[in-house]
Image (cartoon, rainbow, N blue to C red):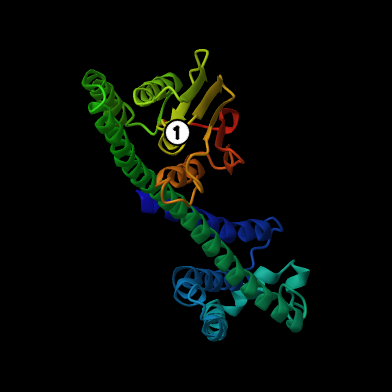
Amino acid sequence: MRNLVKIFPHLLIWTIVLIVPTYLVSREGVFDLKPFYSYTVRIAIFAILFYFNYFYLIEKFLFKRKIILYVVINIALIAVLVMLQTVISESIMATIPPDIQDGMREGHPRMERGKHRGPGGPPFMRFIIDYMSIIFVIGLSVAIKTTIRWYRDSINFEKVKSVQLEADLRNLRSQLNPHFLFNTLNNIYSLIAIDPNRAQDAVHRLSNLLRYVMYDNDEKFVPMDKELEFTKNYIDLMKLRLGPSVKLNITIENAGSKDLIASLMFITLIENAFKHGINNGENSFIDISILVDSGKGVLCTVENSFVEKNVNLESEKSGIGLANLSKRLELLYPNKHEFVVENRTNSFFTMLRIDFSKTEVEV
């Protein structure tokens, strides 16, 4: 059925091409077989040139950059078909009795013997028109074949791009989750020696966090309130090991936003601040701000004291985190985000802004 759908438009077009000239000749009251037979043979030649190029020559030679060979084969093919056209036309006319041809010409001044020069005027003009038509048919075949191939390649490219996107995201998340777990377990390990009860509570909190990471955020995008709740729980877990010399300022404002956001989007910035920005033996600070403007976007800024030098996207100590976040943003929010990482004089600053007004989220 699908093949029939593909073939039908071709049959319809060629049928119309053959029928229309018959209708135009008949309106004059005289149906002259010779011009019609010549026209039919010419159309058959055009069809052969078109489809032989379309189904074989273009794919075999032109698309493989064998242009000279493609042109030579077409020239040879045209020469053979033109000679074949002449032989067939003469053979067809030989089957029509002369008296019938003379009867068809009666009352038709243009068809009187010795005066008819056929369509197109002088032989030289007919020659130019015929070969221009042949070039047009071949060019049309190339244009249609190229357009179809471009359209098919575009669809395939989008499919490959989509598959690659999903693979990259899965790879990035698989790297993020062990990284997050490793750092959190180190925090709990440090807490066990200080306060076992608080360490036990931290294990409970960690189990809730891991449940979210492993099960609750299987979708590419999650509700904003769930992501913020996870972020708050993570911060509470990290606070357990802070000493009095560390100042922690937290501002998280959502106001009931129903927006969706890529999961684990803020944790990398916050984790980096806790890992590299505090020293319980010295005065240090962490400022975290997440502001959600419903339907418009979200702004997350994290600034911490400069305890460890040279913490940036390329730093080994920063690990995979910030570099992966940058990749995820490019994949999930292309041209819809702003990500800033700055080594300031006495602090390390990161800023993430996502514009929801430009984002079409597919869950």
- Image location (x, y in percent) of residue 158: 46, 50
Could you tell whether 274 is left or right of 22 in the image?
A: left
List the single residue furthest toward the front: 281
Q: Residue at 74% across / 67% down in the picture?
A: 108
Q: Is residue 344 above or below residue 226?
A: below
Rendered-image quadrant of the C terminus: top left
Report the front residue among 42 and 52: 52
Residue 33 visible to an observer of this rendering: no
Element carrying mark 1: loop
Query: Dot 1 corresponds to which residue?
Result: 278
Residue 35 visible to an observer of this rendering: yes
Amino acid tagged 1: Ile
- Image location (x, y in percent) of residue 49: 53, 73
Report the front residue among 100 and 177: 177
Report the front residue among 92 and 130: 130
Q: Quadrant of residue 203?
A: top left
- Image location (x, y in percent) of residue 183: 32, 37
- Image location (x, y in percent) of residue 332: 48, 40
Q: Residue at 47% across / 36% down in the picture?
A: 277
Q: Residue at 24% across / 21% down in the picture?
A: 204
